[in-house]
Image (cartoon, rainbow, N blue to C red):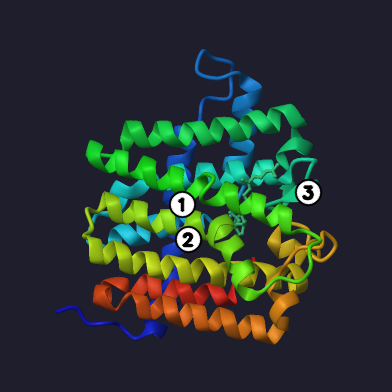
Amino acid sequence: MTTTTPIEAVQSGLSEYMRSARGRVEGALAGYLPGESASAACPARLAQAMRYSLLGGGKRLRPILALMAADACGADAEAALPAACALEMVHTYSLIHDDLPSMDDDVRRGRPTCHRAFDEATAVLAGDALLTLAFEVIARDVRPTSAALACVLALAEGAGPAGMVGGQMADLEAEGQPDATLGELEAIHRRKTGALLRASLKMGAIVAGADGPTLRALDVYGHAVGLAFQIVDDLLDVQGDEAKLGKRVNKDHGLGKWTYPGLLGLEGSRRHARELADEAVGALDLLGGRGDRLRALALDLLERDR
Ligand code: GRG
């Protein structure tokens, strides 16, 4: 029988684990990128733009969730590294495209956005190339082949029209519309932010060969963590520090976006995020002590400042 370690003890080791996992992910990401000089593999300028955005910072939350899920399901987290890298490539593509002049963000991860550092066409192509490379990495490096196929499906579902891209569309359509209900707001963020986070956990678990009940528990955890993460994102847009976040703040209100602070107020949003984090922690009972790190992460995300 596995026993759980006091959550404070796990939380105190979490930042060291995250730092080390980030380092492993970034090393692997660098290895997947085409070289920066012109080659048959990739034109130089495209390679430079892909590298600029993919290796330009970020919390690496999605790959870390995949590694943690694999570990919690009893696998060597290294086995989940290719899937983890594919997730970060898809996430980075979405940020590059999200920043484009139609949305017009000039700072991302503390540096000029891709289209400011290069040009608009190169940024579109760098996003396209990262999205495509993600699926190449899974097909080439996730093993066994049955896990690769399941990861391709999980990533496509999480990132595509039923997931992130559909959520982005719904978010754009909601701009300037009359006030949302909590259910309507959740329906957007379940897809826009939550679907890729859930796919991250699922892909880690798939690589580890997890059974159905474990996959379902991780999905409940991912659903709750995804919404809590978005609430904190909305709070940081109101109260965060641009220098720490590496991006502009106070954007949502000007765009007429539906947000949690707009709907629930600051205190109500914090309370709801806490309830969701508690729900996420509770969802992992089945994993016993193996879920400790994921539990600590759910609580830690409430305190993030970037
Ligand atoms: C509308 C032109 C156009 C493109 C849209 C599909 C897409 C491109 C965007 C998806 C929506 C999106 C960007 C969702 C992500 C939301 C979010 C919370 C981003 C921030 O994630 P963090 O905090 O970022 O994990 P770091 O930089 O730490 O990786």
The residue singled out by tag 2 in the image is 19
Residue 137 is left or right of residue 260, and the answer is left
Q: Nearer the viewer, residue 25 or 266?
A: 266
Q: Amino acid at mark 1?
A: Gly
Q: Residue at x 58, y 77 (%)?
A: 303
- Residue contact between numbered discs 2 and 1, judged by CB atoms under 8 Å: yes
- Residue contact between numbered discs 3 and 2, judged by CB atoms under 8 Å: no
Q: Amino acid at mark 2?
A: Arg
Residue 95: image location, x then y, percent? 64, 47
Mark before the other along the chain sequence, 3 or 2: 2
Q: Secondary structure at mark 2?
A: helix
Q: Is residue 93 above or below residue 284?
A: above
Q: Secondary structure at mark 1?
A: helix
Report if the beta carbon of the residue with label 2 is closer than 8 angstroms to ligand 1: no
Q: Which mark is residue 105?
A: 3
Q: Residue at x 50, y 18 (%)?
A: 41
Residue 239: image location, x then y, percent? 75, 74
Q: Residue at x 56, y 51 (%)?
A: 164
Q: Residues within 10 Å of mark 3 (few under 14, many from 20)?
A: many
The residue singled out by tag 1 in the image is 23
